[in-house]
Amino acid sequence: MANKDQQRMLNDIGIVDFILVELMLFLDTHPDNREAMEYFNHYAKIKNKMVKDFSMMYYPLTKE
């Protein structure tokens, strides 16, 4: 059973992942929107750090 910190981290990763999916959908129809691309890159870095931190504390979330 996951502890509260582990659950919180997984929830936060899910939130950022949702943001990235929404930004990808927006960018599909607005490929020249620089601000949206900057947001996407920003949140992609955040998600990568969150996944790395989670993997170091608990277990890997992705296959490498």
Image: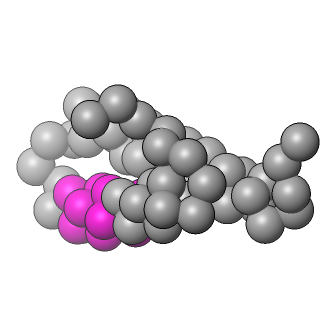
Q: Residue 43, can we see it?
A: no
Choose top left, top right, bottom left or bottom right for residue 33: bottom left
Residue 19, percent from left and from top = 50, 50
Quarter of the rendering occupied by the C terminus: top left
Residue 58 is covered by the magenta coloring? no
Residue 62, above or below 33? above
Residue 40 is covered by the magenta coloring? yes
Q: Residue at horizontal 49%, vertical 40%?
A: 61
Quarter of the rendering occupied by the N terminus: top right
Q: Residue 63, can we see it?
A: yes
Residue 9, above or below 19? below
Main secondary structure found in the magenta portion: helix
Q: Nearer the viewer, residue 32 or 55?
A: 55
Residue 25, above or below 36? above
The magenta segment: 36-47
38 on left or right of 39: left
Q: Residue at horizontal 79%, vertical 54%?
A: 7
Outermost residue, left direction?
32
Residue 2, percent from left and from top = 83, 48
Q: Residue at horizontal 55%, vertical 46%?
A: 59
Q: Residue at horizontal 48%, vertical 62%?
A: 56
Residue 64, above or below 58? above
Choose top left, top right, bottom left or bottom right for residue 34: bottom left
Q: Nearer the viewer, residue 40 or 52?
A: 52
